[in-house]
Amino acid sequence: MGTAGRRNQEIYDLVGIGFGPSNLSLAIALDEHGASAQQPPVTSHFFEQQPTFGWHRNMLLPSTTMQISFLKDLATFRNPMSRFSFISFLHASNRLVQFVNNQDFFPTRHEFHQYLEWAAAGVGDQVTYGTEVTSIRPCAEAGGQAPDLLEVEVRGSDGTTRVVTTHNVAISTGLVPRLPEGTATDERVWHSSEFLGRFGAHAPDDLKSVAVVGAGQSAAEITRFLYDSLPHAQISAVIPSYGYSIADDTPFANQVFDPDAVDEYYFGTERARDAFWRYHRNTNYSVVDADVIRALYQRSYDEQVRGSRRLHFRNLTRVAEVNRAGSGTRVMLRSLLDDRTEELAVDALVFATGYDGLDPARLLGDFDKHFQRDAAGRHRVERDYRLVTASDLTCGVYLQGGTEHSHGLTSSLLSNMAVRSGEIADSIVLRRTERELDRASPVKEAPSAA
């Protein structure tokens, strides 16, 4: 379809792929730009595979709290006056006073999910749920390509497909659950991303022995939850480190999540980038909040006092092999201390082993050849989170995630979400203005040969 043939078809400024917190924050940033600017509003639409809004629903464990302040919400760091702030949500829910009286910077994960649902409903006209983006490609036109336009193919829940046209896409399809090589999930082997759904499918008496693999926050929270929920069961924590390590959330360490730290990382030397990771991994990766560590240790100590033990910590231990045995599972564990193996029979095995980052190539397919990569084979990314093109295409592919190598620790985390989305929104608006100015400029004729 040529450009002329699209006059009767809406051409979006942005199509968002995925509608988790990051693209929700972007939708809000664009909505607020349209409300405050003199220019025409940015046109956008988002497509989400889930039938309704949901964010890590299977990890909404009782009493678990957020690891970031409530002020690091969808909008406040970008616009403290936003009607989509967490404070506005509390006011709309008629519990702002009660939240303040609670004197806690860290809401429960359940309440924060309520907030996200509330905000998503506020921009609900901009998202279509139950749809999957199956391909992205440059638009074709007579004699070649339209360098500033993309075609996005979308498949609905009924199997029908349609194509929408846009100047930019923002990819925020989330992370991919990580499992040991050769391991697959089933009704007895779970990843933490599906925990509550899998757990709820079993009668408590059916789970007499459960093992949790991992050293991070999710692993520790699940271990505590299982211990408290299954008072008759043996609970084993399989930890590759020597116990859980504490998350450093002290003020100076937390500066690594400040918006300014993105510039320091992006424009820094390789030596500086290496220092970021070497010294500050313990702010986010394979670490656990102090209160959860203390709670687990207290339970273990109480067992020693009572002389009854059902909470087992297998430190410096990894899973070597997983085999199904009837209705249960047999796990071969290998100690890193002495290389000895131990076989453990469990009714359920939970891998809280994290996630792999967003790889845009999975979605871009053949279109990926239009974008540059660095010496390590990673996508090159502009400061505004846009992929660097290797051709004359002027359309934009923005990443909400998968930019740790270019933007640092905070690139896909909630901490910098509001500012990151604001920067992407500003980039889309600026590039639209430049595009319109180019079109409005008179074409200079070549000088006459006479």
Image (tube, rainbow, N blue to C red):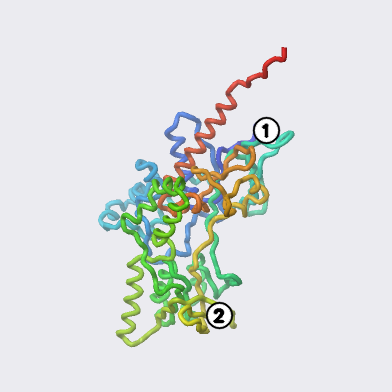
Q: Is residue 269 left or right of residue 366?
A: left
Residue type at mark 1 is: Thr
Give the camera-side residue of 288 and 109: 288
Q: Is residue 309 above or below residue 124?
A: below
Regarding residue 199, the answer to whether it shows in the image is yes
Q: Residue at x 49, y 42 (%)?
A: 384
Q: Secondary structure at mark 2?
A: strand
Drawn side of residue 208 relative to residue 151, left or right? left
The amino acid type found where label 2 is placed reads: Thr
User: Which sits earlier in the primary sequence, circle 1 or circle 2?
Assistant: 1
Residue located farthest toward the top when viewing the structure as drawn: 450
The residue tagged 2 is 329
- 374 w.r.t. 6: above or below: below
Mark 1 burial class by Cα count in 10 Å: few <14, some 14-19, many 20+: few
Q: Quadrant of residue 223?
A: bottom left
Q: Secondary structure at mark 1?
A: loop
Badge 2: few (under 14), some or many (20 or more) residues near its Cα, within 10 Å? Answer: some
Question: Residue 159, image x and y in percent?
Answer: 67, 53
Name the residue beneath numbered marker 1.
3
